[in-house]
Every structure is written in structure tokens, then in C-alpha cells.
Image: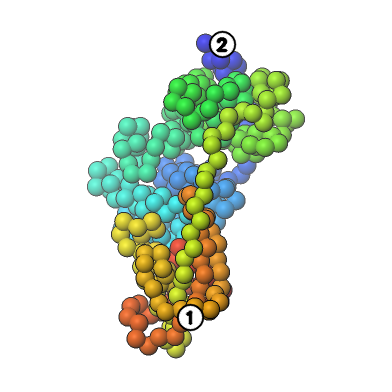
Amino acid sequence: MLHHRKARRLVPRLLDWFGANARDLPWRRTRDPYAIWVSEIMLQQTQVATVIPYWKRWMRALPTIEKLARAKPERVLKLWEGLGYYSRARNLQAAAQQIVAEHSGCLPKDLEAIRALPGIGRYTAGAIGSIAFGRAEPIVDGNVTRILTRIFGIPENPKDKATQENLWQLAETLVIAADDCSALNQSLMELGATVCHPRKPDCAVCPVARACAARRENAIDAIPAKSRAIEYEEKLIEVYLITRGARYLVQQRPEGAVNAGFWEFPNSEHGARFSVPKNARPIATARHTITRYRIELNAYSIRSRRAQGHWCTLNELRKLPFTAGHRKLLKGL
Ligand code: SF4
């Protein structure tokens, strides 16, 4: 109860601070729910600076839900190439098709209907509901979790169910107490992104510093409580750069595989083997990390006239959506 009373007192400070310090981001210049939805999906797991050019390119290429619904899946993946977590792009298109079929091409205003769309969880629904439609819907993501656990001195692991629910209720108290729900939620996002950093937060410029329990108790490094570190699994993959004249052999990842629909060079990931001499050295190496895998790709050059499949020139390859590791190899060619 005390927490909720304190939360309400924070609202004017957060709104004043946001009014004076909000960054000028392109999706903040529009009230188009579709544009805001795309930005929210891109911003999941990706930094603002990276998202800006992707968002602009996407909105130029697919400016409406109908255009996204009708676009070729390969074009959608190409526009997303490099952002990672490609299920986000696939879900955006599936949701757009559902909106065209069931909601006449307009994002529904009803929160339950928004949450019924592919790829939209509680956070994204709250962000769309509050920012696009001005509704008092709470949001809790990593940034908001960090701010609330620190301000209220919540030492429990925020991933625990009861603690999560407590955070959602605090976020709800905040947004209900604000005249401008969109600005309130964005003030939390902004504070987490620009001031209350995971390490070394800039408390000297924080508008709620005087109310912050973690700061007062010198517990900033301990709050929020950390989950166990990810245990990475190393994967070594042979990649075969098979050429016939100026053309390279490539293949598309099958339905159901991670990164389905993306292109790549033939490789040993799914058991394929080309004869590479035992003491041959890779001509290029690329490393990248995805979910819990640290992957090393070692590329070998092979000439073959007999291999069957899809042959492309370098120019043609550059127009196809490639998975991250294979794109690094492609750039080196
Ligand atoms: S005072 Fe520091 S730790 Fe507390 S909310 Fe502000 S920036 Fe974060």
C-alpha cells in the first residue's frame, strides 16, 4: 500500500522530466498505431540507434498494414535482415494478415484483441494501448523492472511470478495516476534507457533520485537481483563456398528450422558433408552468438561442376536475406 502511495507521488516528476528530456525519435512524431507497433517490436532486444534506420526503411517500403500483409515473405525478411530474432518479422506479417482478415485492416483498440495477435505479449499490448490509443495500460519490461525494483528497493528476483505481478501492479498505479498515459509509460522507457543504466546509473540527473531506495541504501549493484548466467554451448560448423565460374551454390533454410526462409551456403549443420581435404585450412571464419549457442563457422572453398541446387552471382546473393553468420562470410567475398 505504501509503495502505491509513493508511486503516485512520482508521477509528476516523471512527466516533467520526460517533457524536458524526451529524445526526438521518429516513431514519436506519429500517432499511427501501425508505425508505433512496428517500432515496439523492433525495439525488443535491439538498441534505439540500430532500430532507427531499419524502422525508417520498413515504413517507406511497407507503409500500411495492408502492404505488409500482402508483401512477399522474402521481402519482409530482407527488410529485417541484421536485426535478428526473425520470428518477430514473421509474426508482424502474420498479425497484419490477421488484422486484414478480421479487423478490416485496422489495429484493434481492444487490449484483448491486440494480445490475440501473433507476437504481441502483455508488454507490447500495453505499449500500443497507451502510446497509440492513450489508454491507461501498464508496461513492464527490463527497463521498467530495473527502475521500479530500485526505486522501491525490491530485492527479490524480478523473474519470480509474485514479484512480476507486484511490478505490474506498481506500473498500473503509475499509469492510472497520470493524465498522459503515453508520456508516463514513455518516461519509464526513457529513464531506463538513458539514465538508470544496468551498471553505473546516472543518479545525479535522475528525477526520482530522492525517492530511490536502492540509491539510499547503496544497493544499486544488487538490485534488480540477477538470474543465473546463460551457459553457452559451442558449435563448430563447416561452410562450403562451392563455386562454378562466378556463381556460388546456396540453399534456403527449411520450414521449422531456426531462421526458416533465410539463405545460406551449404554447411555441415544438418549433417551435409562435402569432401574437404583433411589438412585444408578455412579461407574465412565467422563467429556469432544466437540464443544459447556460440557458433564458429569455418568456410572452405570448393569448385564443383556437379553439385545441384541454386546458383547465384555475388550481386544476386546480396539481394537475398542471409542468416547473420553466413552474411559475415558473404561480406568477405
Ligand atoms: S536514483 Fe539512480 S538507481 Fe535510482 S532510479 Fe534513479 S538512476 Fe536508477
The numbered disc on residue 277 is 1
Which picture quadrant has residue 229? top right
For the residue marked with disc 1, what is the amino acid? Pro
Residue in the foreground of this view, choosing between 33 and 328: 328
Label 2: element kind: helix
Label tally: 2
Residue 168: percent from the left, percent from the top?
Answer: 47, 25
Residue at image point 41% right, 68% down: 268
Residue at image point 27% right, 42% down: 103
Q: What residue is disc 2 on?
A: 2
Sooner in the amino-acid sequence: mark 1 or mark 2 = 2
For the residue marked with disc 2, what is the amino acid? Leu
- Specify the quadrant that holds the C terminus: bottom right
Mark 1 or mark 2, whichever is nearer to me:
1
Residue 153: percent from the left, percent from the top?
Answer: 61, 21
Label 1: element kind: loop
Residue at image point 45% right, 75% down: 240
Residue 200: percent from the left, percent from the top?
Answer: 71, 36
Q: Residue lying furthest right in this view?
A: 204
Disc 1/disc 2 C-alpha distance (Å): 71 Å
Residue at image point 49% right, 44% down: 44
Residue 27: percent from the left, percent from the top?
Answer: 52, 46
Neighbourhood count class around disc 1 (C-alpha, 10 Å): few under 14, some 14–19, many 20 upward: few
Label 1 CB-ligand 1 distance < 8 A: no
> Please, is residue 140 above or below residue 251 in the view?
above
Residue in the foreground of this view, choosing between 301 and 76: 301
